[in-house]
Amino acid sequence: MAFSREFNSMFREYDIRGRVSDDELCPENVYRIVKAYSKYLVKRGIKKAVVGYDNRACSPSFAEAAVRALREIGIDVYFIGLTLSPVTYYAQYYLKCEGAVMITASHNPDGWSGFKLAKGYSKTLEPDDIREVYELVDTDDAPCAGAGEGSYVETDVRPAYIDEIVSRIHMGPKKPKVVLDAGNGGAGLFIYELFQRLGCLTFQLNCDPDITYPHYFPNPSDLKGRAKLREMVTHPYINADLGLSFDGDGDRLGVIDGDGNNIWSDIILAYIAKNLLSRKKGATVVYDVKCSQALTEVIEQNGGNPVMWKTGHSYIKSKMHELKADLAGERSGHIFIGGDDWYGFDDGVFVAAKLLEALSNDEDNIAGAISRFPRYVTSPEIKAHCADHLKYGIVEKIVDTFKARYPGKVYDINGARVQFENGWGLVRASSNLPELVLIFEAQTKDELKKIRAVFRDVLAEYPDISAEWENDIE
């Protein structure tokens, strides 16, 4: 089997993403890939699948190709249309389907697309599964789920999804005032009604889906994308308690406080973990290597079991299920609530509702609540371009360099997280884009800059890594 480098590069660690082009993702290639996924489902005895898509210009035609591929193999399709990744996962439970195809590139820029592919409830494909799907592309053997073509049903799960969230959230006496920013992505179809029903005074920002994304592409990690949200939250005629932003497919959440300060998702996870541990001592909380040391300390201080793991929604979901954890999250904004509260998949909308529930029962606002957490200075996610076919090999060499220089101080489960006396630094290969991701944290800004300088010197040894770092600190 010989595919082009461009086609190969789309099969990533835990999902499939590529540029919208004839070489990468086009209706024909979507059909080929989803047909391979259909065979993957048949091998596991799965005969039904949900199909949804995000708010990109290419998504409707890609969804049509996906539906055709599934039905040709005999898979029954429940088509839910324009939606969010967590709503697709929810639809699996609601419609009793172990298969699911969500057409999305999540927070990747416009001009990209991809798939999140399910392998049962609250689980998506991991590296071995992705490789299996890749190997099934264009194979002659065509296992069939049943006699004839699979059935096709269009259904709207939006009302049931919103109703169930409302039924599970128990607001206290306070009703936070919130600004909601959907970045013109699909989250705008859900969030305004939901938070109105929870009794919050809500203000909308870019909540109308718009495939041209006239202001910025929805990505809660992007500092530029938060500027307008900050301006609206702090406007004297609004004075909101909170600003909430969502990525394009609604599985990631960004938060700013009433003063316009960014609160990274690992600190939001710490706040939610503290509330969980007040009810369930000893609960396990899983989080990725990009998360703050403050999160670890908050979990430990409140009687929880902290577990650091690889970055990636499939990795975190898998570890969460393995350990039967009640809560998990990534610094990028993915937070997974399970146990008795929710279904254990990453859901920015439900997490936002759960955050507001906690705040409605808290005497403090969010800034006051987290002010008692351990304090560190943390950088945003910094990105340095590095070609997809080179980035993993280069990171392996960087890991070896750090291990040689700082023996016993390098956590290498996912790139290199290097512990220093007053902080830490991380470099890892992005799973979704041709770039390296860097994060630094320290007790002071001066110490953070020193750690950054160490990483600058090491990365400068590799000319294939761009010297221009995006989203960098001053």
Image (spheres, grey):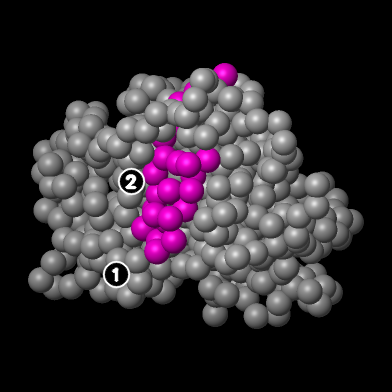
Work out which quarter of the rendered image holds the C terminus and state it: bottom right
SS state under label 2: strand
Q: Position of residue 222 (x, y in %)?
A: 45, 67
Drawn side of residue 3 relative to residue 47, left or right: right
Residue 230: numbered disc: 1
Q: Residue furthest right?
A: 404
Residue 6: numbered disc: none
* Crowd around label 1: few <14 · some 14–19 · many ≥20 (10 Å): many
Q: Amino acid at mark 2?
A: Gly
* Residue behind mark 2: 81
Task: Report the magenta residues as a range.
Answer: 45-69
Q: CA distance from mark 2 to mark 1?
A: 32 Å
Residue 52 magenta-drawn?
yes
Looking at the image, residue 358 lies above or below residue 416: above
Q: Residue at x 33, y 40 (%)?
A: 80
N-term mark: 2 or 1: 2
Foreground disc of the pair 2, 1: 2
